[in-house]
Image: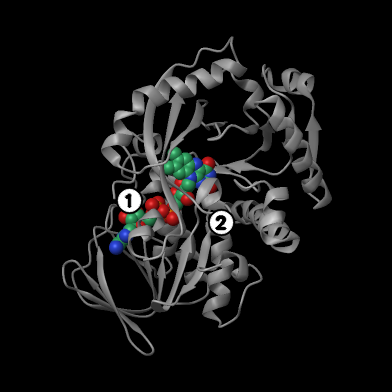
Amino acid sequence: MDLKSNEPFWLLKNGLISSYPSLKSDEECDVLIIGGGITGSLIAHQMIKDGYQTILIDKREICNGSTSATTSMLQYEIDTPLYKLIELIGEKGAVESYKACSKSIDDLEKITKEIKARSGFKRKQSLYFASKKKDAVWLEKEYEARKKAGFNVTWLGIEDVEERFGFQNTYGGILSKQGASIDAFKFAHELLRFNVNKGLKVFDKTEMKSVKYLRDHNLALTKDNFSIKAKRIIYCVGYESSSMIKEHFVNVKSTFAIVSEVDTDKFKNIEQTLVWNTDKPYIYMRSTDDERLLIGGGDEDFSDPEKRDLLLTKKEKDIRRHLKRIKPDYHFYTDFAWAGTFGETKDGLPYIGTHDNFKNSYFVLGFGGNGITFSVTGMEMVSAFMRNETHQLSEYFKFGR
Ligand SMILES: Cc1cc2nc3c(=O)[nH]c(=O)nc-3n(C[C@H](O)[C@H](O)[C@H](O)COP(=O)(O)OP(=O)(O)OC[C@H]3O[C@@H](n4cnc5c(N)ncnc54)[C@H](O)[C@@H]3O)c2cc1C
């Protein structure tokens, strides 16, 4: 599966931060992590902290999957509104899922400090605005549900949105205190470098071809026929998990993003804010630490890379048109446009836990607009699983739910 088109901004901005050797001998470890994107890097950080001998492999260069294409908005807000999630899975699970994403933002900040990261973690508020009059009705209901659950939210009327953000043609929205943004590509590289110094072994261009699931360990075989004996395997393989697991659990889609030229003064009023709207598919935007505006959206229900990349020019225009509608006076000069693979689950929640067909193994698959915050929650969940403990979210994030 080709997970992105050729020009993701983060890949160009950061270049090849670190390259690792491919595996050239047989190895043995406590934990084998398959996948070196943001998820695998976070899980590796946890496993090293917990004292396990850990190996991480990736079939590509490190972070060359979805992690290079992401917009890296860190939100407590899940793609499924809280009031809807309550209807779907009950109040306890829904509120706990939202709270877990909120905690993930705090946890991520702590990790960036712990490893002295320079990947631009920045706390931001978040504006979720109604783009149609009829959407304002359910968005107000959503505001009430979030307030009841204890989140720090304010309802902004049409004039408030215009006054604070200069946005026209909105129908009000929810302003949340909790949120942040980061450069996930650079951060994942920083995490790996930090943990390699603590004993983590990383091999890129090393593809897991097959695994023998034995009684108390697994034997993973790579494409070059080297083996890794591991007590546990943690699959952090992102959207490519859809080809490993027989049942249908995720709708794999295409999504698009554009980033502006550096613009030091024109978009000041959303520098401290993540913005998204109620359109289906929704449009989302943030600024970057080098003062660009990054906008994503335009999702399509297919993942065929050729078809996806042919749409890039049209999608760039569509996304700019959406921006023009709320900010008619602003001219967006596109510097880079790219496409990536994205996944949607039936409830907006991730899949984190065991799967009957993969013994001694766990999956950490953070899908949707909260892929990154879910992966952070995956750290404490996997840490608990490794101690043979359950986690209060296992029930809501498990396969077959
Ligand atoms: C345009 C776009 C915007 C997004 N915006 C946001 C956002 O604002 N906020 C947010 O939280 N999320 C966002 N997401 C989602 C987020 O980017 C993903 O959830 C996240 O990057 C997934 O990281 P990952 O490490 O799980 O997957 P990946 O980065 O895809 O990493 C998986 C790795 O597994 C490796 N792999 C797969 N199979 C094998 C194998 N057999 N052997 C060895 N290695 C293997 C792959 O090579 C790959 O590098 C966005 C995604 C896109 C595309």
Q: Which residue is drawn at 72% across and 61% down?
A: 90
Residue 78, relative to residue 206: is it above or below? Answer: above
C-alpha gap between disc 1 and disc 2: 25 Å
Q: Is mark 1 on a helix, strand or loop?
A: loop
Disc 1 marks which amino acid? Ser
The C terminus sits in image quarter = bottom right
Residue furthest out toward the bottom: 215
**Most foreground residue, 29 or 284:** 284
Nearer to us: label 1 or label 2: 2
Q: What element carries label 2?
A: helix
Q: Can residue 70 be seen in this view?
A: no
Q: In this view, does 90 lie to the left or right of 211?
A: right
Q: Residue at x 19, y 66 (%)?
A: 223
Q: Is residue 247 left or right of residue 128?
A: left
Q: Which residue is drawn at 42% across and 41% down?
A: 301
- Which residue bears the numbered disc 1? 18
Q: Which residue is drawn at 39% across and 54% down?
A: 239
Please tell me how crowded label 1 is: few (under 14), some (14-19), or many (20+) other residues with Cα within 10 Å.
Answer: few
Disc 2 marks which amino acid? Phe
Quarter residue 86 falls in: bottom right
The image position of residue 294, as x and y in percent, is: 50, 29
Q: In this view, does 261 lie to the left or right of 114?
A: left
- Which residue bears the numbered disc 2? 374
Quarter residue 144 falls in: top right
Structure colour scheme: one colour
Residue 361, relative to residue 351: is it above or below? Answer: below
The image position of residue 18, as x and y in percent, is: 32, 51
Establish whether ligand 1 lies closer than 8 Å to the Cβ of label 2: yes
